[in-house]
Image (cartoon, rainbow, N blue to C red):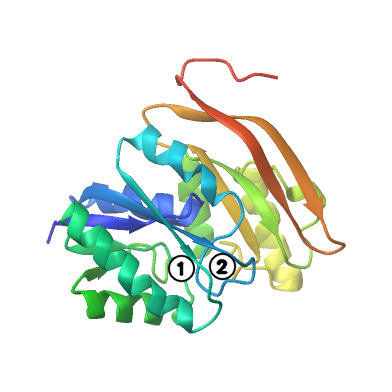
């Protein structure tokens, strides 16, 4: 049944595509909730570039709530309760959209948090076929870049790459060869959405720098802005 929903929002492909599907299913997007973990080792929350979700929320036209979590591990889920309660009170939604694909650990903890604060969990991507999902992102007009990698076969050159059909083909081969998850589940890679059908304007990255640590790294977006979709991107 359609309802007003909040979206647990990281700025990556999964939470954005989940919001897109929720809206297509008839749900009304009441607000985005971005959690900023203090540690890159967070078990539940996205780390690189979450500060830029303000542009994504503005591009879509929904309110954004942000909160910081200092704990790592089991305490993260309980810190989430207070954040969800405040968002629910302010924006009056009944359900919470999350973008998990296959992590039972995350799903269990998010659903328990929903129960504790009286929200209905909405998980439109749960157990989706990862290859079908990644090709759907491309087909449905999502412009998504890779902003973090931490898996065998994903080198520094992947940072900043756009998800396209060629990348999905490459991921299928990597999955067969070394077991990389085609949908980047489990922290193997992080992403950031620059444009999608939900956006009224798109994001242009003006400055970004790669940080590489031997076998993993991330792309730090240092400057970005919203531009009309017809405007040619700055070279």
* Residue 167 or residue 124, whichever sits in front: 124
Mark 2 sits on what residue? 185
**Spot occupied by residue 71 in the image (x, y as percentages of width and height):** 53, 76
Q: Residues within 10 Å of mark 2 (few under 14, many from 20)?
A: some
In what quadrant of the picture does the N terminus appear? bottom left
Is residue 107 visible to us here? no
**Spot occupied by residue 58 in the image (x, y as percentages of width and height):** 38, 35
Of the image marks 2 and 1, the number of the one nearer the N terminus: 1
Q: Are marks 2 and 1 in contact (CB under 8 Å)?
A: yes
Q: Residues within 10 Å of mark 1 (few under 14, many from 20)?
A: many
Picture quadrant where residue 149 is located = bottom right
* Residue that lies at the very extreme toward the right in this rendered image: 214
Mark 1 sits on what residue? 101
Picture quadrant where residue 206 is located = top right
- The correct choice, above or below, for 97 with respect to 53 in the image is below
Left or right: residue 155 compared with residue 162:
right
- The correct choice, above or below, for 13 with respect to 224 in the image is below
**Spot occupied by residue 119 in the image (x, y as percentages of width and height):** 21, 70
* Residue 23 or residue 169, whichever sits in front: 23
Residue drawn at x 47%, y 29% is 202
* Residue 235 or residue 135, whichever sits in front: 235
Q: CA distance from mark 2 to mark 1?
A: 7 Å
């Amino acid at each position: 049944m359609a309802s007003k929903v909040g979206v647990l929002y990281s700025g990556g492909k999964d939470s954005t595509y989940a919001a897109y599907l929720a809206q297509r299913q008839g749900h009304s997007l009441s607000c985005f909730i971005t959690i900023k973990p203090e540690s890159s080792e967070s078990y539940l929350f996205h780390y690189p570039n979450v500060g830029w979700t303000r542009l994504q929320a503005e591009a879509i036209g929904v309110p954004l709530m942000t909160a910081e979590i200092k704990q790592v591990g089991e305490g993260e889920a309980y810190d989430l309760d207070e954040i969800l309660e405040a968002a629910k009170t302010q924006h009056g939604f009944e359900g919470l959209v999350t973008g998990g694909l296959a992590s039972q650990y995350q799903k269990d903890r998010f659903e328990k948090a929903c129960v504790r604060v009286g929200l209905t969990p909405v998980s439109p991507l749960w157990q989706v076929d990862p290859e079908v999902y990644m090709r759907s992102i491309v087909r449905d007009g999502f412009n998504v870049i890779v902003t973090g990698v931490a898996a065998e076969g994903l080198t520094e050159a992947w940072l900043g790459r756009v998800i396209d059909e060629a990348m999905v083909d490459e991921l299928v081969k990597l999955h067969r060869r070394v077991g990389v998850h085609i949908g980047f589940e489990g922290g193997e890679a992080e992403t950031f959405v620059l444009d999608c059908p939900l956006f009224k304007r798109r994001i242009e990255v003006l400055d970004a720098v790669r940080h590489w640590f031997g076998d993993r790294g991330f792309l730090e977006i240092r400057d970005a802005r919203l531009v009309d979709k017809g405007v040619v991107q700055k070279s």
